[in-house]
Amino acid sequence: MPTPFETAIAQSLRLRWEQHLYRSRRVIAGPQNTRLTIGNKEYLSFCSNDYLGLANHPEVIKALQKGAQQYGVGSGAAHLICGHSAAHHALEEELAEFTGRPRALLFSTGYMANLGAIAALLGEGDAVFEDRLNHASLIDAGLYSGARFYRYRHGDTQSLIELLNKCNATKKLIVTDGVFSMDGGIAPLPALASFARDHNAWLMVDDAHGLGVIGEEGRGTVDYHGLSAKDVPVLMGTLGKAFGSFGAFISGEENLIEFLIQEARTYIYTTALPPAIAEATRVSLHLAQQEQWRREKLGSLVSLFRRGAGELGLPLTDSATPIQPLIIGDNAKTLHVSQQLFDHGFLISAIRPPTVPVNSARLRITFSASHEVQDVERLLSQLEKLL
Ligand SMILES: *Cc1c(COP(=O)(O)O)cnc(C)c1O
């Protein structure tokens, strides 16, 4: 007799197969790059979040090696015990400066930063307002916080106002992705900031896909919209995407950061990042800011793709960022096209529910400053044959 767990697990797996929602991993040999090696074959990849091409940058690698020599590998403990190194501290100061806020606090991952910050800020009797297309970690954080949870229609500021108007909670937090991770669209931050002001609420932006990529020197969505730290009191950023490294941070006022150090459980009860990772990130942060050509190149590759895809009549969204999904709709069809692309040497992931809404399965195509014009042309001519 199978146990109830065995029965439930087998059923869940079978259902996923039947609905074309089964997920599996591909084993990559070698570093993150536009060319990836899988089982001795080379693929042209359009699915990483290494937008600036820094994940495999020689200077960043050198900083990691040097950091390991100086600090060893493990941090040894949580930040509040004895794991907070000079490397972490320096990176926090540089992130604060980069985001134009007094302080920044490192977390081990973006998922943990969102969970820790939102659950520390909100509890029973409070309210959280989230865009329906927010990243899963923000949704989970809102639910976990115990606050009343309101989801507004994607980018629909009218629907948000209605929810705000009928909510009498004391602390209200509006939470949004800066750049939506599966769509590439930029959140309407000026409107959100003004509603937050009107309703005495706070606005939190998760800028995992905006930092490094848009705004002056890559300062992200808040800078792109010309907003201040006052408009967006809580800014979250990740270091594993455009910065090509690992980890995440929250930046804001002195008291907010001190409060998170005391109260954010995913900060307190976890081992600090390896200090060498912090050293590597300091270098990639510097490169990301200084090397404007990476953002310019990225921008021209995106334009080239959009022009070509438009001429082919492909189902583009109106994204102006390096995230350029082609929405196919049906799960099986999306999976099939992704598999065909793979057979032709392209790595592009099929993103299906529940990561995206039902009937909006898509090919999530992302560009990197390491791509070349010929890569985009090859992609377009393959898409022309398959779609
Ligand atoms: C990737 C991502 C996260 C999670 O960050 P990790 O460091 O990978 O855990 C959070 N929010 C958004 C919008 C993301 O895209």
Image (cartoon, rainbow, N blue to C red):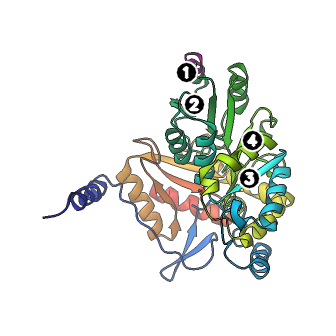
Mark 1 secondary-structure assignment: helix
* Marks 4 and 1 in Cβ contact (< 8 Å): no
The residue that mark 4 highlights is 256
Most frequent secondary structure within the magenta stretch = helix
Mark 3 surroundings within 10 Å by alpha-carbon count, few (fewer than 14), some (14 through 19), many (20 or more): many
Q: Quadrant of residue 46?
A: bottom right
The residue that mark 2 highlights is 129
Given this view, does label 4 or label 1 mark the residue nearer the observer?
A: 4
Q: Quadrant of the N terminus?
A: bottom left
- Horizontal arrangement in the rendering, residue 287 relative to residue 154 (left or right): right
**Closest to the observer: 229 or 343?**
229
Q: Earlier in the sequence, mark 4 or mark 3?
A: 3
Q: Residue sitting at 47 percent across and 81 percent down? A: 39
Q: Residue sitting at 63 percent across and 32 percent down? A: 174
The amino acid type of the residue labelled 1 equals Leu
Mark 2 secondary-structure assignment: strand
**Cβ of mark 3 under 8 A from ligand 1:** no
Residue 278 magenta-drawn?
Answer: no
Q: Is residue 259 above or below residue 93?
A: above
The amino acid type of the residue labelled 3 equals Leu
**Label placed on residue 163:** 1
- Horizontal arrangement in the rendering, residue 335 relative to residue 165 (left or right): left
Q: Is residue 285 visible in the rendered structure shown here?
A: no
Q: Is residue 83 above or below residue 197?
A: below
Residue bounds of the magenta highlight? 161-167
**Closest to the observer: 259 or 151?**
259
